[in-house]
Image (spheres, grey):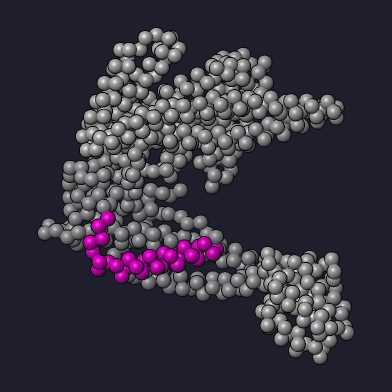
Amino acid sequence: MLFPEKMFRVEIGIEPQYSDAVLERIGLEGVLHIEKIKAMPENEAEASRVKTLLTLTLAYMKFLEIIPRHRQTHAGPSIDQQLNEIENTLSAIGSRIEEVSQELRASDQELQWFHKAAAIKNALLPVVDVETLSKNLNYLRFRVAIVTMEAAELLRLSAKHTGLLLIDRPLFEQTSAIAIFYEEEQEPEVLKGFNTVKAIEMNQIYFSEQAYKLQQLTGQKLHTKREILSKEYETSLQNSQSHLRNLHELEVAKSSLRESPKGMILGGWIPKKSAKNFVADIEHAKVTFLEHEGEAPVLLDTPSALKPFEKLITNFSYPRYGEVNPVLPFAFSFLLLFGIMFGDVGHGLILAFLGWLVKKNIAKYADFGQIYYLSGLSAAFFGLLYGSVFGVHHLLPHLLFSPLENIQATIIFSIGIGIAIITLSFLLHMVTAVKRKEPTLLFVSEGSLLWLLVYWFTIGIFIKSVVQELDITYEAILLSLLLIIIFIQLLRKTGQGSQAVIDLLREFMDTITNTLSFLRVGAFALAHGALFMAVFSIARMISESYGEGLIYWILIIIGNVVIIVLEGVIVTIQTLRLEYYEFFKRFFKGGGIPYQPYTLGGKDEN
């Protein structure tokens, strides 16, 4: 849990006549991360056919709104025959889908014309009712179109010159809706003008409410037809998609085989916990364990409750093999900082409840729901320490202190939290250095033991000189010696004295400013309390003018909602900033390779 899963590098010797069966067995095990080398181009035609059919199947499923399902399937002896069968199935399905698809596209295009007509009708309505005119105008003709504003000006000048009646109104951006009225013998001139300015003429049928309803009914019938097709072909397409996906994975595995005098060779990585069963289950092949070479793929062993935090980290960068698993310290420090800044029992419980609702009911945002569920619980815990319930501080005892009533204690507390988190980052860096057996990381790099000593000597000197007002001569000498040692190391590394000085000063100043950045933790804790005061003050002032009672409580509720939304977003952003730029700086380098096992559907049923 503290480190990624231990990985074994393996080389699998496969008897050539059993290569397909062995690769299928490996895929069903679903634990081997294959080293892809693209060594067998003779499989490219078959692989390309599989990929094409898979793309087509997924396109049909997307049109029919069918959710993909991954199931275990067996490749069988004749892949070509299976592909022929799937191809025939897709051909039969595709003809019906294409028919409905074309009809839906045509229906949607017609609806777009109706929507444009509605916009034109609304634009011209202050002057003329286009729909009524299209039904009742007998002695004059009229045409309606969309033109650019410059074209509308030209048509207006032309209409004045020829004695035509033209009405134009602004429509969309830089466009106008125009209606032009004319007698029958003037129609060629009107059409010539429309062609000259490239007007988009609107058929008058699109202004009919009855025609619009008929078109909507046609669209509904087509959507019903698509739903019927979806139910009819759901199982067939899901089976084809699952089988093609597995064949595609099999072809990718084949392309990573390399020839040797003893047979076919497949290289990769296996988690230590799966190695014994893997070796026992693979027949007609010999599994050889090799020395580590290069960067192993990373499999993080994270508790399910903290998986959403893992995604926040891997979106930033993936940890390297041998690095400390950053999820646990990240989740702990994130919840700690969020709780301190957002501490209130009422707000925390509401945030936790909303997060729980999102997690349970909106799968797309379940990860965010889990993060805010845990963050809300942390905020409620610190609200209990502050004695704050919806900004009221006399309902509960102050187990720690109330931020607004103890500003100095709040600031000192936030700096202390910052020192603890930065110290933790140093320790995690050193643990990683020992784990990866890289002594230079332990003594020379930014998060090294020497820099930790510099950091704590600086803190000690500040406390002793400023707070206790004691002599710091010996401490200053020791700090200077540490900085000289680091300078010598940097000089040996860079070979340039000026660069070594710059690096030394930059890292020393970064360490100080990183600590001071945690002042924002106390500042936001104070701001959270100050917003409560503002809400209560505004509610009291307004209620005094309009009478106390319902208005007062409505304003209090609105104010609390604003605080939860506003502070929730801002505190989340500030917490992530402190994590990424102050905490991760020393121990998290990233750039790792995610563990992606070759699997034929057995590992991701859900």
On the question of residue 435 being in view, the answer is no
**Residue 147: where, in percent of width, then height?**
70, 74
Residue 8 rendering spot, x and y as whole percentages = 23, 42
Q: Which residue is drawn at the image coordinates 77% and 78% (left, top)?
A: 157
Quadrant the N terminus occupies:
top left
Q: Is residue 37 magenta?
A: yes
285 within the magenta span = no
Please give left or right for residue 214 compared with residue 275 in the image.
right
Residue at the far front in the pictured view: 498
Seen at 46% across and 73% down, the residue is: 91
529 left or right of 433?
right
Q: Which residue is at the front of the view, 256 or 123?
A: 123
Q: Which residues are magenta?
A: 36-64
> Taking 552 as reference, is 40 left or right?
left
Front residue of this view, candidates 376 and 278: 376
Principal SS element in the magenta part? Answer: helix
The mark tally for this picture is 0
